[in-house]
Image (cartoon, rainbow, N blue to C red):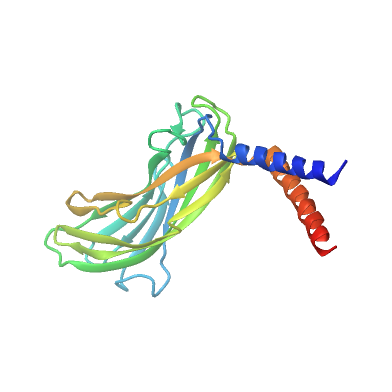
Amino acid sequence: MTCNRIGKMAAWALALAGLIGVAPSAKAEFFEYRSTVTISDTSGTFTPSGATFTNGTTAGGNTFSTITLPDGNSVTLFGFTSGNDTTTPHLNASDPVSIGTDIAPVIVSTTNEFGTVGEDIAFNFNVTLNLTNYLNASDTSPDGTGSVTFTGRISGSIGNNAVALNLLSFVPTSTTVVVGTELYDVSFDATSGFASPGGKNVGGISLHVFARPVPEPGSLALLGMGGVGALGVFLRRRARASA
């Protein structure tokens, strides 16, 4: 086999691999999620110093973490569960219109006693988002699972029938996790991803989820083939130039 022919094969391989890499997937992917939350009670990460903490699980199986201030006002973060294997149809992770879907993995709830003096509050928290992938909307057997953990900090004031909380940080703002045969892109929008409880005492944190296929071994092999062939062409030309 001549070097010229090897070079042509390399070019064909690279072209084919490129087509495979950019071709959009028409296959829809579906998912369910479960989130767990924990407020940090490490000294120095929260105010005021007289606050107390409670962690637990609701009757529905969702985790929660509460920080209670000296005057009785409190903030609770609830993890949320979208469903399970039998909760169908599952959520669409590759909706072509919204390019994925928005989820609300954390609910922020407050209680504030009327007549109490407004108290400053600040605390760190962790959120672990567990994703379960399904190949079809009605599947009862998952394709795989994956998880990602976020860390954040909330501060503000609460009391006298008023709530003003701000999300100071939430990282990572975007990440990718392998869930079964899919890559799940999970992102947080700093401008709209946090809703303070306000006067209704209920707010939350939202994320955007989008699934895309994991590159198939065949396309990776073609890329490797093309790379080896291209290296051969480069070395051949270099040898001619130095002759």
Q: Is residue 119 left or right of residue 213?
A: left
Q: Position of residue 212 (x, y in %)?
A: 53, 39
Q: Where is residue 20 in the image (x, y as percent from the top left)?
A: 62, 37
**Which residue is depicted at the point 34% across and 56% down?**
190
In the picture, which quadrant includes the C terminus?
bottom right
Q: Residue 118, located in which quarter of the rendered image?
A: bottom left
Q: Is residue 120 left or right of residue 26?
A: left
Q: Where is residue 177 in the image (x, y as percent from the top left)?
A: 55, 48
Q: Residue furthest left?
A: 115
Q: Which of 233 and 66 is in front in this view?
A: 233
**Is residue 90 depicted above or below 221 in this figure?**
above
**Is residue 164 depicted above or below 102 in this figure?**
below
Q: Position of residue 142 (x, y in %)?
A: 57, 33
Q: Nearer the viewer, residue 2 or 195?
A: 2
Q: Residue furthest right?
A: 1
**Which residue is depicted at the point 66% across and 40% down?**
15
Q: In this view, does 166 lie to the left or right of 92?
A: left
Q: Which of 191 and 20 is in front in this view?
A: 20
Q: How many labels does the image show?
A: 0
**Which residue is depicted at the point 17% across and 52% down?**
199
In the picture, which quadrant includes the N terminus?
top right
